[in-house]
Image (tube, rainbow, N blue to C red):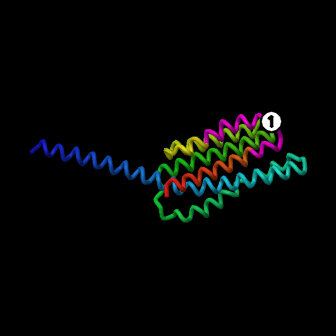
Amino acid sequence: MEKSNGQNKEMTAAESLALITETLNNSRKDILNNSSKYFVLWGCLLTVMSLVIYMLWHFTGSPKWNFLWFAMPIGYPIAAVMGRQDKGRPQNEIGRILGYIWTVFGVFSICTSVIAVYAVPMHVTLLIVVMLGIAESISGAVLKNWPVIIAGFILGVGGAVVAVLMKSEAQLLLFALGGVLLVATGLTIKFQNK
């Protein structure tokens, strides 16, 4: 009798572990589906901003149009409105981690840009593209999603190489490409998990 009782406990532990694993996988899939809209939002915003700044710089010859980048945080209220639909969903650790990753990226990008403008001249395009690629790849690792990891790697490493080769306003086209990659990532996630 004791032997069968012990086997029942093991079976219960195995079932419990399977249930926890299934719950985590479902949660990851739900967050992945939900995050696709944010990849699309920030990708569209990045593409539009970079093309507008590129055209203004190209046609006027003035790099001062780069100050328009400080308007990028307009995406936060838009994301907040989009997030209202998620109010009924329970928040979990994976969602919080993704939020922290992208918040850190935003803070580092803004601080790097301010330092480059006012204190230490640096190749800001190179730095921000690398940080963007890292943030996307880490997000992909957290979500266990290879397309997101690969897109981040292509953007970060490939973007760094291209940023060094491009001069002046042409570098803004790299951000437009990064935005397109973010949109493609969001759409890939959405269609993968339908």
Q: Which residue position holds label 1? A: 121
Query: Element under label 1?
Result: loop
The magenta segment: 152-173
The quarter of the picture where the N terminus appears is top left
Query: Is residue 120 or residue 53 the one in the foreground?
Result: 53
Residue 24 in the image: x percent, y percent?
41, 50
Residue 28 in the image: x percent, y percent?
46, 51
Residue beneath the point at 53% across and 43% down: 146
Residue reaching furthest to the left: 1
Is residue 23 rendered to the left or right of residue 52? Answer: left
Circle 1 residues within 10 Å: few <14, some 14–19, many ≥20 = few
Residue 59 in the image: x percent, y percent?
89, 51
Q: Amino acid type of disc 1? A: Pro
Residue beneath the point at 67% across and 57% down: 75
Is residue 146 rendered to the left or right of residue 161? Answer: left
Residue beneath the point at 64% across and 44% down: 105
Is residue 127 rendered to the left or right of residue 53? Answer: left
**Magenta residue check for 30:** no
Q: Is residue 40 above or below residue 177?
A: below
Query: Is residue 47 or residue 112 the one in the foreground?
Result: 47
Judged by its main secondary structure, the magenta piece is: helix
**Magenta residue check for 169:** yes
Residue reaching furthest to the right: 60
Image mark count: 1
Residue 3 in the image: x percent, y percent?
12, 42
